[in-house]
Amino acid sequence: MFKNMRNEWFFNIRGDLLSGLVVALALIPEAIAFSIIAGVDPKVGLYASFCIAVIIAFVGGRPGMISAATGAMALLMVTLVKQHGLEYLLAATLLTGVLQIVIGYLKLGNLMRFVSKSVVTGFVNALAILIFIAQLPQLTDVTWHVYAVTAAGLGIIYLFPLIPKVGKSIPSTLICIVALTAAAIYLGLDVRTVGDMGKLPDTLPIFLWPDVPLTLETLAIILPYAVGLAIVGLLESLMTANILDELTDTKSNRNQECKGQGIANIGAGLLGGMAGCAMIGQSVINIKSGGRGRLSTFCAGFFLLIMVVFLSDWIKQIPMAALVAVMIMVSIGSFSWSSVKDFKKHPISSNIVMLSTVAVVLSTHNLALGVLAGVLLSALFFVNKIGRLMIVKQEQTGSELHYQVIGQVFFASAEKLFAAFDFSYATDKVIIDLTHAHFWDISAVAALDQIVIKYQRLGADVSIIGSNEASKTVIDTFGTHNSSRTIEKLMSDH
């Protein structure tokens, strides 16, 4: 137990503490902005980010991943808040957590293996573009000071690591925020600050049971929102976990992450926060700032609460331009530039899947719809490809016709199977060899039935040989060519 704690919590103390501080600073404007999107008070998003980050540090399935209030989740809450108010949002948050725990225990997190690399790349690219677009309001209709501070921030972020010894020991993102805040205060620059985003809370969160009637009517109101929040939250969390797996060369526990997200959301709902999930932007900031263990996630939430409640006078003075520079760095670092560089090398089907995922996410701002579109397209391309690999070889010896079926036979190749058989001339004996074939579904069996019955009507004796055990079970269970009723019908037709 102690060895496991050391491996996940205390193997990178310095890096986790510093990265947690950087992430906490980046979380403040994001949480406030997402609260505004959802139509609730900024403290709802800030409390949620604190609760979710701290809880997920203990119960999540991916060390080093940052979970908090997110834009994807906030977009799903707008109508509920507008029509029914905050209390129903808190109730929906609790139900979201329950559903996610159930999904975790049902091991549905393993379904992520059906998400192809092209879909993940499209998801990452779309999210990187959305992160960049989200910064544009901070760069529109502003003074030249904002552009100067943003440019200076990007310069610090990318150039500071080049300084010998010191550049690698302190996160450049932290230097960026601290240095630009000090410069803005000293020079009295006319730039927007965190304090301009909304009022920061001045008290610790308290236990808050949603003030809603416990009736079926309430359940009918919150259930559709809770289902959407649960699915989108887990999709974004598991996709983010996949990305961090690649960045850190480690492995996530998907089903534990589902349960952890559920527990964290229940905690957020009980402390007056909105539902949240993993954040790819902040998670990448954490990793690139040196965070690796659960301690970094815990520190992000803990420092966030300390800063907004006890150090708000200082936090309010951080220039938004400094945080914009950090988020632009995240968008640049998150985007898969290799997907553009190798576009001509990749199969056209993979490129279509990637671009479709990006297009759907950008047009709907719904990550779940983008991933769903990508998965469906991947499945269609795969089915089409496998269906084309099935071939039928024909050989005639006297009055005996021998067919050898090779490949996978299912709904996509069933029509091709039937078309491969020649019914144009009479023969006494037909042998269908399935040694190198596999029958998967009733469509494949139905095609085989058609073939056998048609030859039988032409007066041929049909034998099926070589089928493996699985194919034989499917054929025997769903096939009709050997049934007594079919044989009687054939006899009566003659």
Image (cartoon, rainbow, N blue to C red):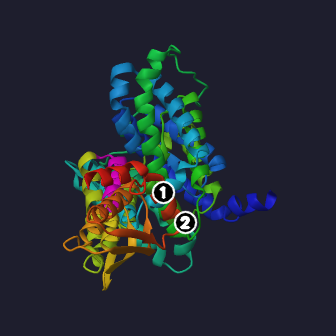
Within 10 angstroms of label 2, few (less than 14), some, or many (20 or more) residues? few
On-image quarter of the C terminus: bottom left
- Is residue 90 shown above or below 195? above
**Mark 2 belongs to which amino acid?**
Glu
**Where is residue 301 drawn, in percent x and y?**
57, 45
> Which residue range is magenta in the image?
365-380
**Mark 1 belongs to which amino acid?**
Asp
Judging depth in this view, the residue of 103 and 71 nearest the camera is 103
Residue 152: tell me if it is visible: no
Q: Earlier in the sequence, mark 1 or mark 2?
A: 2
Where disc 2 sits, the SS reads helix
Q: Residue furthest right?
A: 2
Q: Residue at x 26, y 59 (%)?
A: 356
Judging depth in this view, the residue of 92 and 491 nearest the camera is 491
- Is residue 78 shown above or below 30? above
Where disc 1 sits, the SS reads helix
Q: Which residue is mark 2?
A: 469
Q: Comparing marks 1 and 2, which lies closer to the viewer?
A: 1
On-image quarter of the N terminus: bottom right
The image quarter containing residue 203 is: top right
Q: Is residue 445 left or right of residue 423?
A: right
Within 10 angstroms of label 1, few (less than 14), some, or many (20 or more) residues? few
Residue 74: tell me if it is visible: yes
Dominant secondary structure (helix, strand or loop) of the stretch shown in magenta = helix
Question: Residue 201: within the magenta?
Answer: no
Q: Which residue is mark 1?
A: 476
The image quarter containing residue 264 is: top right
Q: Is residue 447 left or right of residue 32?
A: left
Q: How much space separates mark 1 and mark 2, taking CA atoms?
A: 10 Å
Question: Residue 367: within the magenta?
Answer: yes
**Where is residue 320 drawn, in percent x and y?**
36, 49
